[in-house]
Amino acid sequence: MAEITVRRNGPYRIQGPVVLKDHDGNVIETKEFFTLCRCGHSKTKPFCDGTHKVIGFVDPPPPPAPVV
């Protein structure tokens, strides 16, 4: 089973058997491990190229807890 981990202040880490396709259904990647950009500034989108470190990407704050 594939697992997706959101790295703190970093990319999505994809680990396990997964097929990544583009909007037309073409296979982009079939590796067992890769990272996807979350900051929006990678030059190799959808993959992470480490730019998040250079630009100082920080996770947005979590949403407030619901009021009961």
Image (cartoon, rainbow, N blue to C red):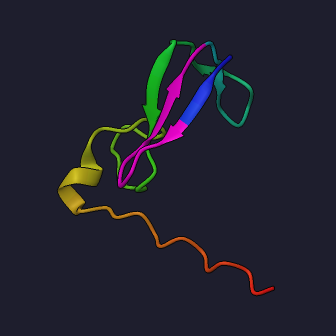
Q: 29 and 16: which one is in front?
A: 16
Residue under the image location 43 percent in, 32 percent down: 35
Q: 64 and 4: which one is in front?
A: 64
- Residue 54 position in % (x across, y down): 18, 55
- Residue 21 position in % (x across, y down): 66, 26
**Residue that lies at the very extreme toward the right in this rendered image:** 68
**Residue that lies at the very extreme toward the front in this rendered image:** 68
**Depicted 45 relative to depicted 65: above or below:** above
Q: 28 and 65: which one is in front?
A: 65
Q: Quadrant of residue 48?
A: top left
Residue under the image location 46 percent in, 51 percent down: 38
- Residue 8 position in % (x across, y down): 38, 51
**Residue that lies at the very extreme toward the left in this rendered image:** 54
Q: Is residue 58 left or right of residue 47?
A: left
Q: 9 and 21: which one is in front?
A: 9
**Depicted 9 relative to depicted 2: above or below:** below
Q: Is residue 41 left or right of residue 22?
A: left
- Residue 62 position in % (x across, y down): 54, 70
Residue under the image location 61 percent in, 80 percent down: 64
Q: Is residue 55 left or right of residue 23?
A: left
Question: Does 29 lie within the magenta span?
Answer: no
Q: Is residue 42 left or right of residue 19?
A: left
Q: Quadrant of residue 1?
A: top right
Q: How many marks do you count on the picture?
A: 0
Q: Locate the C terminus and report the quarter of the image it occupies.
A: bottom right
Question: Does 13 lie within the magenta span?
Answer: yes
Q: Which residues are magenta?
A: 5-16
